[in-house]
Amino acid sequence: MDVQQVLTGLAEQLRNWWPVPGIAISVVDRTGEPAFVTAGFANAERGVPVSRRTRFEIGSVSKTFTSFLIGILADEGKLDLDALVSDHLPWFAPNGDSRAITVRHLLQHTSGLVAGADALPDAAARGYALRDASTWAEPGELFHYSNEGYNLLGLIVEQVTGESLADAMAGRLLRPLGMGDSAARITHEDIAELAAGYRFLRDDRPPLPSAPLVPAGFFEYSAADGNVLATASDLGLFARMLLGRGVLDDTRIIGPESFRRIVTLPVGAVSSSYALGVDVEVIDGHTWLTHAGGMVGYRSYLAADIDGRHGVAVLTNAPGECQIIDRFARHVLAVVQGAPADPALFDPERIADAQRYVGTHGTSPRRIRVEASGDGRLSLTADGVSGRLYDSGDGRLVCDHPAWSAYHHTLDGRWLYGPESLGPCPCEPATPPHPLTGNYRSYTPWYPSFRIVQRAGRLHMIAATGVEAPCDEPELVPLGDGTFRVGADPRLPERLASGPAPDGAVLWVDLDGCRYTRSFRGHPEA
């Protein structure tokens, strides 16, 4: 098999079906880089192609770098993974200092802290804002992905080294690995050869696979949850170090015991495959180390089969929420290890479990009929008009039917679509509408807008786009005094607070410190 040719074909097919302006793929083994593929544009407006030197923001793959940096510092005796966070950051005292959060809890995403706090862009300010946070899960009890936990780890690195996070990471990881085209911070001075990032033109409705893109714009970033920019070949060097279990080309980067700790799942872990900064999966008897990364304008994926001896780094300047890149990268790793190439895995019109959606959902006047063709394609018919259903890449469906395109579609016993819950019997939202229902918007590029809908008498928060937006359409559970928990699990920390409603419709809400205002006031969907 000509791996280079096969992967080039897969990359071009991916770009034909999905909004991926440019892509770079590095395939590595322990000894080198047997394949390197690029397709598309680093800058679509100027027609600049992706090259070997093109840099991309790698997003949360940076967390794996942070974890390894912490491990190296543990090897140096500078910190203990079971030390309290407050030992290094004395001002950090959540819950009145009644729950002891450790460095290990931050690495595992089991601290109980919020997922994100996008109101403050600076790392130090974000961390300090959590000094007296409230959590509702005992540390170590609940896996809850937290960018804020990794931001705190970066502040700890700076405290124990006396260096900036960027310098500490460059000196202990990037330079020893030979990642000369990469940087541990994203600043105006560090963006030479950086691909232009892209976002969806519209953020108020689910994007179809053919959705138009616009430049995402650039902003600086240095927090440890997403601070690294890299070329695909440089990230491939990091993957080779994973394959060598901490060793690259006879140079030991991290001690064997620290490597083992990083890739070992917590005792009793059942709901997560996350160890310390890396997902650990067993695929056909092989151990895969993986991590996805999304930034505003970039999506990346790193995967290394440390038993099969291959790794891949896939970097793109597609919108950060394009999770189809994760599926693509995993298939690339399987292909280079002997699996047949199957581009149909990325065909957005082919729904893997299409038959389970087939049937009539709802009752008159809100009724839809879903039909499947023999090759897994689905159509939705309502009011005599038909539209195509597509895979959205994140476990949900989207539709181009003009009256059924405003929200994602899911099937969970009943057909769920925004405020609709369609089944064999009516299940209408309570009337009158709750004052919170409407469309809300903020300045944050990570989570720009969402809608609050009333579905079967309960409030749900639904985001159409956004790198940090949830895909599970969480329920808003009232807690009193105009405050709501985001999600049904009582251990979840996210909170939404309702603002004033002078004429019966709430004007703004506060989501974990970030204010969102009601948009298009008076519009039927607002």
Image: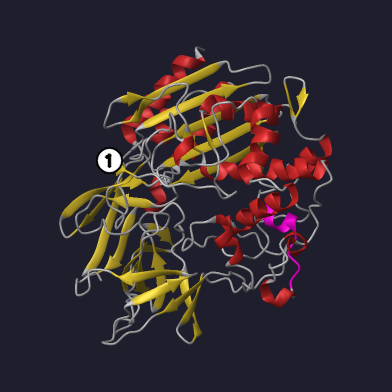
Residue sitting nearer the eye, 363 or 132: 132
Asked if residue 159 is positioned above or below residue 323 in the image, the reply reads below
Asked if residue 422 is positioned above or below residue 80 in the image, the reply reads below
Residue sitting nearer the eye, 277 or 386: 277
The residue sitting at 48% across, 16% down in the picture is 4
Q: Quadrant of the C terminus?
A: bottom left
Task: Provide the residue span drawn in magenta.
Answer: 99-108
Drawn side of residue 374 relative to residue 152, left or right: left
- The amino acid marked with disc number 1 is Ser
Q: In the rendered image, which quarter is residue 64 located in?
A: top right
Q: Which residue is mark 1?
A: 210
Q: In the rendered image, which quarter is residue 125 located in?
A: bottom right
* Observer able to see residue 268: yes
User: Residue 510's x, y, as percent?
Assistant: 43, 73
The residue sitting at 57% across, 35% down in the picture is 302
User: Residue 456's x, y, as percent?
Assistant: 38, 76
Drawn side of residue 421 relative to residue 130, left or right: left
Residue sitting nearer the eye, 119 or 267: 119
User: Residue 252's x, y, as percent?
Assistant: 78, 28
* Observer able to see residue 283: no
Q: Residue furthest left?
A: 384
